[in-house]
C-alpha cells in the first residue's frame, strides 16, 4: 500500500538523511521523496565525497532545506548546522553508508556533518550500507557494523545481493528503498515528535518566488574595479562580487532581464544575464550609463566596490624596483552620483530606481548623508568590520535606508536573502512609480 493510501507514517517528524560517497547516492534522492510522501520533513547531510556522486541541488529542491556538507557550517542565524539537526531530528538515517563512514562512526571521528550529527544526537539511527562485496565482508567492516549495531544500538538495514557498480555480482547493493523507509518508521516508533516547532528545526529554504520583476530590466554592477599602475600592477580592493551576483541571480529568478556590469569578480556569473566587463572606474561608468539610460533600465543596483582614486599616470612599461616610488593619485568619477543626477532629470516610467551600497567600518552614521549626496532611492549600508558581514562572506547584516526616510535594520542573513529583501523594496518602488505615472493627467493639446 502506498503512503497516500495508508495513513502517513512519519507525519510531522523530522528525518535527517545522511548520504555518503557511493554510486548508490543517486538512490537517496528518491528516498527523500518517499520519506516526504510519508509526511516527514527531511533535512539532508552529505559527506564531501557524496557531493561528487549526487549534487546538492536535487536534495535541496526536494527537501526544501539547505544541504549540510560542512561540519563547520553555520546556519544564517549563526546556529551550528549539524547540532541543530542532532537536537531536532526524530530519526537519523544514513543511506548509503560507506565503509569509510562505518569506520569513522565506529570510532567517533566527527570530520563530516553526518558523523558529527550522530555523535551529538540522542535520536535513533538507522544505517543502510552499500559497497563492494569484498569490502562488506572485510573483518574491519564486519567489526564496525557490529559495533554500530550491538554497542551503539543503531538499526542495520543490511545490503542485498545483486549487480554492483564494479560490474560484478554479489552482496553490497543498497537495500530496497521501501525497506529503508520501513526501518525509519520502526525507529521512530510511537515516541512523541521531538521538536515540532519549525523555529527549533533547521530553516526551510524559500519557496519559489512569483515572477514579480517580469518585464523589468535591472542593471547590477558587481565586483571591484582595478586601476592600472603599470601593465602588471593595479590598485584594487577586496570585493569578490558575491553580493552583486546574489542580487543578479535573485532578480533573474523573479523574472527580470538582468545586465551585470562586472569588475573583478571571484564567483561565477549567471549564464542568463547579459554581462559587460569593465575593469576601470572609467570603463564601469561608461557601461553603467549605457546600460541604465540607453538600454532603458528600470533599476540600477550599484553593488560594485568602485575605486575612489586612480594613478594620475599609468606607466606603459613595468616599473622596476629601486629606490622609492611615489604614486600621484587623482579622484575617479562618482558613477552613482552621476546616475542619481541624471535620473532626477528623468520623469515618469522612464525614471530608473537607483540603489547604492555603502561599505562602512565601525558606524553607519554617514549613510543617510551618502544616500542624499548620491541621489539614490535606496542605500544598502553595512559595517564590513563586523564578523559575518562584508567582503567574501556568504552572509551580511545590512540596513536599507530609503529616500522617503524609512530604514530597515535586517538581521544577519545570507547574501541571497539580503538580495530578496532589497528586491522586495525595489519591486514595490517600481510599482509605485508606474502607478504614479498612470495617474498623471494626459496633457491636452493646445
Ligand atoms: N560609487 C560609485 N563611484 C565611485 C565610488 C563609489 O558609483 N567612484 C558607488 C558604490 O558603487 C556604492 C556607493 O557609491 O554604491 C557608495 O560607495 P562608497 O565607497 O561607500 O562611497 P564613497 O563615494 O566612496 O564615499 P566616502 O568616500 O565618503 O565613503
Image (cartoon, rainbow, N blue to C red):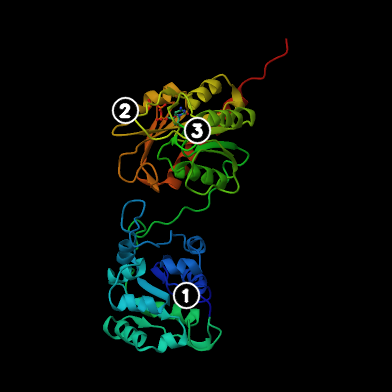
Front-most of 229 and 396?
229
Based on the displayed image, in which of its 4 quarters is residue 98 positioned? bottom left
- N-terminal label among 2 and 3: 3
Q: Which one is closest to the eye, mark 3 or mark 1?
A: 3
Front-most of 356 and 154?
356
Give the crowd class for mark 2: few <14, some 14-19, many >=20 residues within 10 Å: few
Q: Indicate if the residue with disc 2 has its beta carbon within 8 Å of ligand 1.
A: no
Residue ID for mark 2: 365
Give the crowd class for mark 3: few <14, some 14-19, many >=20 residues within 10 Å: few
Residue at image point 51% right, 32% down: 429
- N-terminal label among 3 and 1: 1
Residue ID for mark 3: 317
Disc marking residue 310? none
Q: Position of residue 6 (x, y in %)?
A: 50, 77
Based on the displayed image, in which of its 4 quarters is residue 42 positioned? bottom left
Q: Position of residue 154 (x, y in %)?
A: 33, 80
Residue ID for mark 1: 22
Q: Indicate if the residue with disc 1 has its beta carbon within 8 Å of ligand 1.
A: no
Q: Is residue 190 visible?
A: no
* Disc 3 from disc 1: Cα separation: 54 Å
149 relative position to 28: left or right: left
155 relative position to 344: left or right: left
- N-terminal label among 2 and 1: 1
Residue ranking furthest to the top: 446
Q: Is residue 305 visible?
A: yes
Residue at image point 39% right, 56% down: 203
- Which element carries disc 2, helix, strand or loop? loop
Residue at image point 31% right, 39% down: 385
Q: Position of residue 295 (x, y in %)?
A: 64, 32
Q: Which one is closest to the eye, mark 2 or mark 1?
A: 1
Amino acid at each position: 500500500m502506498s503512503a497516500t493510501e495508508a495513513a502517513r507514517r512519519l507525519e510531522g517528524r523530522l528525518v535527517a538523511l545522511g548520504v555518503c560517497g557511493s554510486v548508490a547516492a543517486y538512490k537517496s534522492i528518491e528516498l527523500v521523496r518517499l520519506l516526504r510522501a510519508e509526511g516527514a520533513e527531511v533535512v539532508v547531510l552529505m559527506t564531501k565525497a557524496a557531493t561528487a556522486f549526487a549534487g546538492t541541488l536535487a536534495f535541496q529542491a526536494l527537501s526544501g532545506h539547505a544541504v549540510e556538507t560542512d561540519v563547520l557550517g553555520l546556519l544564517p542565524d549563526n546556529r551550528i548546522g549539524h547540532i541543530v539537526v542532532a537536537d531536532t531530528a526524530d530519526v537519523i538515517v544514513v543511506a548509503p553508508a560507506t565503509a569509510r563512514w562505518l569506520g569513522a562512526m565506529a570510532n567517533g571521528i566527527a570530520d563530516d556533518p553526518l558523523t558529527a550529527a550522530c555523535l551529538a544526537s540522542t535520536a535513533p539511527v538507522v544505517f543502510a550500507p552499500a559497497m563492494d562485496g569484498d569490502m562488506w565482508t572485510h573483518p574491519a567492516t564486519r567489526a564496525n557494523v557490529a559495533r554500530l549495531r550491538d554497542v551503539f544500538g543503531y538499526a542495520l538495514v543490511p545490503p542485498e545481493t545483486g549487480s554492483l557498480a564494479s560490474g560484478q555480482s554479489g552482496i553490497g547493493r543498497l537495500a530496497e528503498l521501501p525497506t529503508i523507509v520501513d526501518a525509519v518508521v520502526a525507529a521512530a516508533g510511537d515516541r512523541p515528535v521531538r521538536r515540532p516547532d519549525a523555529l527549533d528545526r533547521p530553516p526551510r529554504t524559500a519557496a519559489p518566488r512569483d515572477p514579480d520583476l517580469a518585464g523589468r530590466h535591472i542593471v547590477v554592477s558587481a565586483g571591484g574595479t582595478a586601476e592600472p599602475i603599470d601593465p602588471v600592477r593595479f590598485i584594487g580592493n577586496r570585493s569578490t562580487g558575491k553580493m552583486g551576483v546574489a542580487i543578479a541571480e535573485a532578480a533573474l529568478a523573479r523574472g527580470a532581464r538582468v545586465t551585470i556590469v562586472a569588475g573583478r569578480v571571484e564567483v561565477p556569473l549567471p549564464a542568463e544575464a547579459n554581462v559587460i566587463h569593465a575593469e576601470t572606474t572609467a570603463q564601469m561608468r561608461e557601461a553603467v550609463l549605457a546600460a541604465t539610460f540607453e538600454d532603458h533600465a528600470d533599476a540600477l543596483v550599484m553593488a560594485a566596490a568602485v575605486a575612489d582614486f586612480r594613478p594620475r599616470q599609468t606607466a606603459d612599461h613595468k616599473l622596476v624596483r629601486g629606490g622609492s616610488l611615489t604614486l600621484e593619485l587623482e579622484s575617479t568619477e562618482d558613477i552613482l552620483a552621476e546616475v542619481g543626477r541624471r535620473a532626477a532629470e528623468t520623469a515618469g516610467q522612464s525614471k530608473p530606481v537607483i540603489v547604492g551600497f555603502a561599505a562602512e567600518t565601525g558606524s553607519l552614521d554617514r549613510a543617510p548623508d551618502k544616500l542624499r549626496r548620491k541621489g539614490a532611492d535606496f542605500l544598502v549600508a553595512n559595517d564590513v568590520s563586523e564578523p559575518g558581514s562584508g567582503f567574501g562572506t556568504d552572509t551580511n547584516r545590512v540596513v536599507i535606508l530609503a529616500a522617503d526616510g524609512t530604514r530597515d535594520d535586517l538581521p544577519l542573513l545570507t547574501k541571497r536573502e539580503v538580495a530578496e529583501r532589497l528586491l522586495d523594496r525595489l519591486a514595490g518602488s517600481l510599482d509605485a512609480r508606474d502607478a504614479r505615472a498612470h495617474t498623471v493627467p494626459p496633457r491636452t493639446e493646445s
